[in-house]
Amino acid sequence: MVPVLNSGDTAWMLISTALVILMTIPGVALFYGGLIRRENVLNTMFLSFVSFAVVSIIWFVYGYDLTFGTDIWGLIGTISNPLFGGVVESNSLSTYAPTIPTGLYAVFQMTFAAITVALISGAVVERMKFSAWLAFIPIWITLVYMPIAHWMWGGGWLAKMGALDFAGGTVVHVNCGMAALALVLILGTRKNARLLPHHLGYSIIGTGLLWFGWFGFNAGSALGATNLAVSAMIVTNLAACVGMMTWILMDKLKTGKPTMLGALSGAIAGLAAITPAAGYVNVTAAIIIGFAASICAYLAVSALKPRLGYDDSLDVFGIHGVCGMVGTLAVGFFATPLINSAIKGGLIAGNPMQIVIQLLAIVVIASYSFIMTYIIGKAIERTIGLRVEDKEEVQGLDITLHEESGYRLS
């Protein structure tokens, strides 16, 4: 059957792409910006905006080809259309989504690459040089994100093995979480390592935009206006709600009081965990995933981080990294062909080997991301330097790095 462009699928994917862009700018920017000291609000938001800009340029120069081009030994794609030359002009339909244009599939995937980098920034805010961040983005997206995305989504070796990641549990969340952990181990702790949200209102708006945009992230990964997109949207929302209520309960049990910050964290935990599973699991599984992920993230943030002493400023590893692992492993248990006929399913569907494959994907991607990011971070540290001077950190990065202030204070 000859592929034919479907206007409904194309319209949905255009909307989904815009929704994921909204997640990065201004979603992540506002969410992160409200959680830090007011002296660093502009710098923190700037990191998200510049991440989106740099990744967008690189993606269409050579990134899409390296990720989704003709496979080379299961490791990386071939650069066959540098500068995306002739692709849009040809009006071709995507190999990966044959009812939408290739260009639309490419820009949709670009948004995933951009938000992955932006998420990492939450771990290093308040102490990383802006110049170092600018150097980090192109190196990391090329050497870390593109190979991993190819392995899982571009026909690489993990995909051939049968590893499942519907919308980015490994490619986005495990990847950014481990990269964040590597960078903070190099940077060391801040002078004031307490979480001091200066404007939770920003973070509430940012979380709302992230939640809203996540429907494009997950339901859009169905790559069409289909029943699968509907199912992904339902389980995405449910996992977020369960994650939020679970974190509120944990706060109440531990401190006696529910917190708004806890509610936001729980929602993000549920969303991150359901991402790899959204197109493979039913409502019951989504509830279990949201509940388990929120507990695991809570323990990672409240117990693991203090015990190990690393300064992951906004808990990128503790929430995104940990929940990406929980959700990816959950696919091995709960995936069912009743939701997605293209897969065999997981343990409950009679395919226990899927658990082993999912676990392998987690270990490989977590290890690769951590090791490569550590090498990149060390290289930048020894050349242009990674961390700001002590006096700049104390005074705040908005003034010292940008000569700007987020607020006009008398």
Image: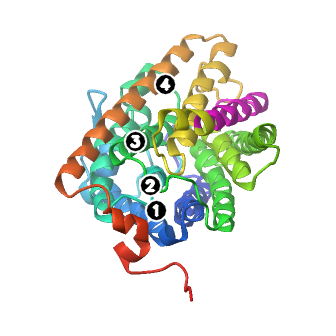
Q: Which is in the foreground here, disc 4 or disc 2?
A: 2
Disc 3 designates what residue?
179
Residue 70 appears anywhere in the view: no
Above or below: residue 64 compared with residue 327: below
* Image coords of residue 287 (percent x, y): 77, 33
**Distance in Å between CA atoms under marks 1 and 4:** 30 Å
Which kind of residue does numbered mark 4 sit on? Ala
User: Which one is in front, 234 or 6?
Assistant: 234
**Distance in Å between CA atoms under marks 4 and 2:** 28 Å
Q: Which is in the foreground here, disc 3 or disc 4?
A: 3
Pointer 2 local density, CA inside 10 Å: few below 14, some 14–19, many at least 20:
many
Q: Main secondary structure of the magenta part?
A: helix
Image disc number at residue 163: 4
* Image coords of residue 267 (percent x, y): 70, 47
Q: Which is in the foreground here, disc 1 or disc 4?
A: 1
* Image coords of residue 82 (percent x, y): 24, 55
Above or below: residue 129 compared with residue 287: below
Disc 1 designates what residue?
48
Which kind of residue does numbered mark 1 sit on? Ser
